[in-house]
Image (cartoon, rainbow, N blue to C red):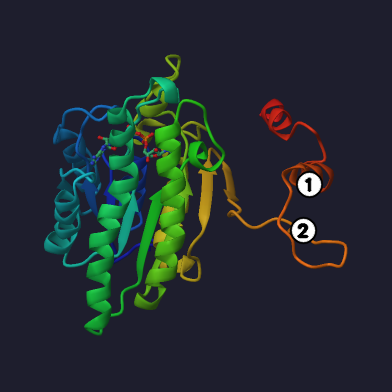
Amino acid sequence: MGLLEGKVVLVTGGGRGVGRGIALEAARHGAKVVVNDLGGSVTGEGEDQRVADQVVDVIKSRGGEAAASYDSVADHEGAKGIVDTAIERFGRLDVLVNNAGVLRDRMMFSMSPEDFDTVLKVHLYGAWNTMNHASAYWRAESKDGRQPSGSIINTVSSAGLQGQASQINYGAAKAGIAAMTIIASLELSRYGVRANCIGPGGFTRMVGQARADIEVKNPEDYTEFNAMNPANSAPAVVWLASDDSKPVTGQVLRMVGNSLCVYEPWRMGEEFYSTDAEGNPTQWDPAQVGHILGRYVFRTANPGIDAQRRK
Ligand SMILES: NC(=O)c1ccc[n+]([C@@H]2O[C@H](COP(=O)([O-])OP(=O)(O)OC[C@H]3O[C@@H](n4cnc5c(N)ncnc54)[C@H](O)[C@@H]3O)[C@@H](O)[C@H]2O)c1
């Protein structure tokens, strides 16, 4: 018996790469799957319904149940259509996996406003749009006495959590998604809905944009373990989607290759106070800031340069 028996799982960007691996693994665990994919280029142009259809066909050929959705997550009304597809085709929605993505890498001084907007629209607004509609549905279910066991799984990246030159648009979106997830976990727990993140990895066309030397394959074409299989993070998503992880919310997991870890969230470090000789609170003096941080926190005169050297 699979971990997702009886659940309806919606995967945005489920037609290729990481999302395709999640859609197939969810179906293998007994879920009915809505495969959403606009089918556009890696930089966000065009559309092609065959991209979602192909994954639906694979799931059906294996005896599973799946439906396609072709709307763009970047469009607020489109996102309603995506959520409604699950409810209309399978009668409910239990799991929302926000995975759809595009890339437009440039150093910030060369990036156009359109490159910035396009990436934020798909990743940050895309996750917000579907969460907005799905959370309204779950809240209404809860108020009608049908307490959901809902799970949102959003997709992040080290580019947002650790930083990556040339990805100021993508990194801002991914860091924003992590923050939205933590807030969603706080707002939705009373309605029986959890929200967590996954940081995936693998050779997909997105990675192929930066590296010409890689081979991009569909997850189901790997016949044995390969550290670059984009489906390697799917087990973490299936677990987060399942009732086995019910106490887990507001967390950011990373599963790449055969490694698993949990990101530590931003937290306040040691606090210092400026006082006069009698211990009364005073405003900080700029030179004092550098002295205190250099001596007690950075323990070096060059914290920025040292941090870049360590990278
Ligand atoms: N591949 C990696 O190493 C890696 C690392 C960290 C994070 N990620 C994240 O994983 C997710 C999947 O990326 P991938 O590497 O599989 O890329 P991919 O390009 O192979 O797949 C992304 C899919 O999203 C779809 N999509 C794009 N815009 C859409 C829209 N507006 N509406 C609906 N669908 C849309 C595309 O058509 C595509 O099929 C992304 O969120 C990405 O940022 C990937």
Q: Secondary structure at mark 1?
A: helix
Whole-percent x and y of residue 45?
20, 27
- Up the image or down, 132 lies above or below 158; here it is below
Residue 140: quarter of image: bottom left
The answer to whether the residue labelled 2 contacts the one labelled 1, judged by CB atoms less than 8 Å apart, is yes
Which residue is at a point 23% across and 61% down the rendered structure image?
A: 133
Q: Quadrant of the C terminus?
A: top right
Give neighbour class at mark 1: few <14, some 14-19, many 20+ (Cα, 10 Å). few
Residue 230: quarter of image: top left
Name the residue at the top extreme. Answer: 213
Which residue is at a point 20% across and 54% down the rendered structure image?
A: 65
> Label 2, on which residue?
274
Name the residue at the right extreme. Answer: 277
Which residue is at a point 17% across and 56% down the rendered structure image?
A: 80
Q: Which sits in the foreground, 166 or 135?
A: 166
> Marks 2/1: CA distance?
9 Å
Q: Quadrant of ligand 1?
A: top left
Whole-percent x and y of residue 301?
80, 33
Q: Which sits in the foreground, 311 or 229?
A: 311
Which residue is at a point 15% across and 43% down the rendered structure image?
A: 70
Q: Quadrant of the N terminus?
A: bottom left
Q: Is residue 200 left or right of residue 206?
A: right
Q: How many marks?
A: 2
Q: Which mark is residue 44?
A: none
Amino acid type, callout 2: Ser
Give neighbour class at mark 2: few <14, some 14-19, many 20+ (Cα, 10 Å). some
> Label 1, on which residue?
288
The answer to whether any part of residue 63 appears in the image is no
Amino acid type, callout 1: Gln
